[in-house]
Image (tube, grey):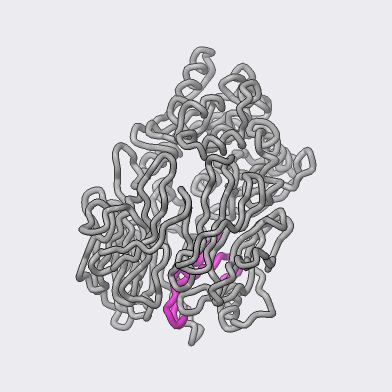
Amino acid sequence: MRLFYSMLLLIASSLLNVQAQTLSLEDYARPAQFLEIKISPTGKYLAATSRNEEGNIYLQVIDIKTNQIVSVRHFTGRDSIGSINWANAERIIISLVRDIGALESPVATGELFAVNADGSNPRMLTGYRAKHENDAASVINYLSDDDNYVLIVTATPSRRGSFSLVKRLNIDNGRARQVARAPMRSSGMMTDRTGVARITIGIDQENDNEMIMMYRKNEKADWETLRRYGQRDGSFTPLAFMPDNLHVLGLSDTQTDTKAISILNPETGKEEIIAHHPKVDVSPIYSIKNGFVNEVIGASYEYEDYEEVYFADIEDKAFSGYLQGLRNAFAGKKVNFSSITQDNSLAILTVRSANHPREFYLFDTRNMQLSYLLNGQPWMKAEQLAQTSSVLYTSRDGLDIHAVLTLPKDKEAKNLPLILMPHGGPHGVRDFLEIDSDAKVLAQHGYAVLQPNFRGSGGFGRAFLQQGFLHWGSSMIDDMTDGVQHLIKQGMVDANRVCVYGASYGGYASLMSVVREPDLYQCAVSFVGMSDLNLMFEEGDTTESQGGLNTLEMYIGRDKARLDAQSAIKNLDKIKAPIFIIHGAQDRRVPLIQAEVLRDELKKRNHPYEWLVKEKEGHGFYKPENNVERWQKMLAFFDKYIGDKQAAN
C-alpha cells in the first residue's frame, strides 16, 4: 500500500516535512487533513476524503489492485463534502454541507449527491437542487442486498414537529417512493434487516417530554406503543435488529442505573441484560456479517482506562479473534472498523487514543495482515503531545468523581499551575480519554489541565446525572473545586496558581467558580458561556420549542430567586478574579447578550476584564485563525496571572 499512501499525500505533500519539535498553535487549530477512508463492498476501491491547505475537501477513489487514482471530485462555492458511503460496489453517496449566512462553520443541507467510482453519472439526489426529491434527506439504510436503492428519511420542518417519511430512493436517477410514515411527530425511524421501518421513537412534547417507543410486526401491521418513559425514567435505546429480525440490540437503564447492553423482544416486551458495569455506561462490541450486526461478542467502557471485555460463550469466534488480536497489537488505543467488505475479507481500521492521533490501517482478515495507510493529521506525532490520563477523587459529600488530567510533557508533576476546564452540556455529556485541543495546547505551555466529570455529567448512571438537576451553580461547582483541591493535596498543583476556563456550560461554570471560590482562582475565562440563568428563558434557541423549554425547566427550574443565586451576573461583588469574555456574535444557543450584560456590569464596577468577540462565529469558533487568536490571548491572560513569573513572585 505504499503507492496508495503516497498518492493520498500528494494533496498535502508540504505537510510531510514535519519538524519533531513543539507543535504550533496553528498545528492544533488546523482541521484534520484526512477525514474518512471507506472500502467498497467488493474490496475493489478505497474512497478517501482529504482537505487541502485552502480548506477544500476532495474525494479520491483509488483502485486497490492497480494503486491508481480513478477519480477525484470536489465542490465549488459554498458547497463541500460532509460524509461519504458506498451505496453499492461502484457508486458513492456524498452528504453535502454548505456555508450559510454569516456563520463560519458549514451546516448539513440534507442534500445527497451520488457519483460512480470512475466519476461518471454524477447526480444530486435530494434537496432543492434535485430533479425529483426536493426535501432534505438522510440515509437510514443502505440496503446491502440491493444495488439500486437506499432508504432515506425526509421531513418538512415545523415548529410543532413534522412527521418523518421513509422513502425508497433510486441512487441512479434520484426518483423516490414513500414506503412508510412515522406514526407521531418529531420521531426517528429504525428499519429491520429487510429495510422495513418497524421501530420509531419520539417525544410527546404535550406530556412533559415523555419518550414513546412504537413498534410494528411488519410493514402491513399497525403501529403499537411498546413503551413510554418519563424524562427521569430509565429507557431502552434501540441500535439494530439481530439476525432473527425480531430481537433488538440496544442500550438500556430500565433495570440498571448505568446503561447496559440489552436485547429486547418487542413481541413480549422482555429485556435480557447482556453486559453491565456498576460505575459507568458500556457499549456493545459486535461482529459483522454481510453488512449487518451479527452477534454481541463483547463490551467496552471507559473509567480509569479504556477497556474491552470479550465474551467466551459466542458463535462468531473468528471475528472476536480479529478484534482481540488488534487490541493486543494496539494496546491502550481504541480500534474501530470504519468500513468492511461484504465478505469481511478486508476492513479499514481507525486507531486512536488520548495521546495518539488517529491513524488509518487496511486489515486483511484472511491473512491477518495490517497495512498502515496514513495519519489523519500528518503534522502531529504522538511523541509531541502532552500526556493525558484519568484521575479519580471523592467529592465532599462522598461521590466518586472521574476526571481527565493532562500534564505538561517536560515538567515534573509538582507545584504546577492548573487550569480547571469543565465541559459544556452539561447533562448527558462527559469528557473522555480523547485528544482535546484546548487541553493539549494549555499543557504544552506549562499548565496542568483538569477536566472533571462532575455530577450531572453523562455516562455514570442516571442517579449521578440527575443529582446535577437544579444545581448548576452549587454542588456541580463544588465537585469541580474538590478536584482542584485533590490535586493540591497530591502536591501536583500550586494552590496559588489556579485559573478556570470553559465553554458553554463550562464558561458559565468558570464564572460561578470564581463567585463560589473567590480566593482559590486567580482568573477565569468564559467562552460562549451564560452569565444569567433567568435570561436563558428569554434569549436563545433552547426555548424555541416546547420540548426544549420542558428540558430547561427540568435542568434548572423556574424559581427566580434560586436562578439569581446561581447566576454570576447577580453575584459580581463576590468576584475577585479578572475575567476574560470570549463569544461568537452569531451564537444562537447562548446569544451575545449573555456576554454583553456581563461586560457592562464589570465595566460599571471597574472590575478587570478582557473581551474578544468574532462577528461571524457561533457557539464555539470554527475558523482556525480565530482559534489561534483565542489561544494566543488566553495564554497571555493565564501567563499574566499564574505563569512562571507569578511563581517566582
The answer to whether residue 408 of the structure is visible from this angle is: no
Q: Nearer the viewer, residue 558 or 230?
A: 230
Q: In this rendering, is residue 202 above or below 349?
A: above
Q: Quadrant of residue 466?
A: top right
Q: Is 160 colored magenta in this rendering? A: no
The picture places residue 616, in percent across and down from the top left corner, at 34, 35
Q: What residue is at 43 percent from the left and 70 percent from the top? A: 195
Q: In this rendering, is residue 219 above or below 568?
A: below
The picture places residue 253, in percent across and down from the top left corner, at 67, 56
The picture places residue 431, in percent across and down from the top left corner, at 59, 49
Q: In this rendering, is residue 194 above or below 16?
A: below
Q: Nearer the viewer, residue 347 or 269?
A: 269
Is 587 left, or right, of 321 in this rendering?
left
Is 543 left, or right, of 68 in this rendering?
right
Which residue of the protein is positioned furthest toward the right in this rendering?
398
Which residue of the protein is positioned furthest toward the bottom in this rendering?
367
Q: What residue is at 72 percent from the left and 50 percent from the top? A: 392
Q: Which quarter of the image is occupied by the N terminus?
A: bottom left
Q: Is 354 colored magenta in this rendering? A: yes
Q: Quadrant of residue 560?
A: top right
Q: In this rendering, is residue 255 above or below 158?
A: below
Q: Which quarter of the image is occupied by the C terminus?
A: top right
The picture places residue 398, in percent across and down from the top left corner, at 79, 43
Q: What residue is at 45 percent from the left and 67 percent from the top? A: 219
- How many labels sit on residues? 0
The answer to whether residue 310 of the structure is visible from this angle is: yes
Which region of the structure is painted magenta?
Answer: 330-355
